[in-house]
Amino acid sequence: MFTVSLIGPDGVGKTTLVSRLQKALPMRVKYIYMGDNIESCNYVLPTTRWWKKRSLRHRKNVENLKPDSLSNPEKDRDLNLLQKMVRGVRKTVGFSNRILDLWYRYFMVVYFARRGYVVLLDRHFAFDYYHFDIKPQNGRRPLKRRLHGFLLKHTIPDPDLVICLDAPADVIYKRKGEFTIDYLQNRRDQYKSLKSVVPNFVVVDANRKLGTVIEDVSNLICSFHQERLNHA
């Protein structure tokens, strides 16, 4: 059928709203998490979970290492070179798996949309990273970020409808207590600025009763659905 992405700063209520929308909408709905939190993913490659656990183990092992009281400078140079090579390979493998996992999730999006579902996307990679890895800027980004931005921009389709949930930064901060109010305000501005580059973009006031927000978003999706039927 079509895809709807709900975006906005962390703590604005995306996940809560999406979970309630699945019951509120009159059509068949499929929910897919499209963010970086692996624990929240309902569709993810097995290698992604494995890599996450492996990375956590590696980090703990590094933190527990104790420097030798007596070191051999020549041996240390060889070891440092080997460590840099291993670190480079590890980062390349991790980045490659991240892109493959992203493509896998979008394959599932297309799969369900073509089978008549309204696919609700909790977040969207291209919009979350737009101002960091995609938006043109002065100066050059690191190669990894440029490649990441290129792949997001050119290999991931935009949703049919984008709903940006918005609330005052201090309200968002009180809900989760994460980040700073200045950071959250900056993210609010960044998300809302996407209206100039994303078609079918709607900002919804999330600083209201949950039931009211659900009703408004549900009406937006149903109206969008009707418009598509009228133009079919």
Image (cartoon, rainbow, N blue to C red):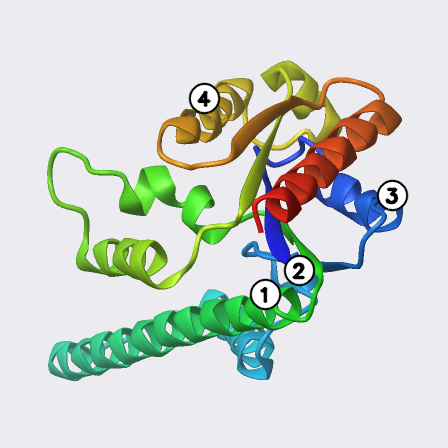
Q: Are marks 4 and 1 in contact (CB under 8 Å)?
A: no
* Residue to which mark 4 is pinned: 189
Q: Residue at x 63, y 43 (%)?
A: 230
Residue 64 is at least partly visible in this image: no
Between the C-alphas of marks 2 and 1, the distance is 7 Å
Q: Of callouts 3 and 4, which one flags the residue occurring earlier in the amino acid sequence?
A: 3
Marks 1 and 2: in contact by CB < 8 Å?
Answer: yes
CA separation in Å, label 3 and label 4: 29 Å
User: Dot 2 surroundings within 10 Å: few (below 14), some, or many (20 or more)?
Assistant: many
Identity of the residue drawn at 66% across and 63% down:
41
Report x, y in % for residue 197.
35, 34
- Mark closer to the chain start, 1 or 3: 3
Task: Read off the residue under disc 1.
Answer: 109
The residue that label 2 is drawn on is 32
Q: Nearer the viewer, mark 3 or mark 4?
A: 3
Where residue 147 sits in the image (x, y, percent)?
24, 61
Helix, strand or loop for disc 3: helix
The secondary element bearing badge 4 is classed as helix
Looking at the image, tell me whether mark 2 or mark 3 is earlier in sequence order.
Answer: 3
The crowd level at tag 1 (other Cα within 10 Å; few <14, some 14-19, many 20+) is many
What amino acid is at disc 2? Ile
Please count the marks in the image.
4
Query: Dot 3 corresponds to which residue?
Result: 24
- Between the C-alphas of marks 1 and 3, the distance is 20 Å
Q: Residue at x 58, y 47 (%)?
A: 123
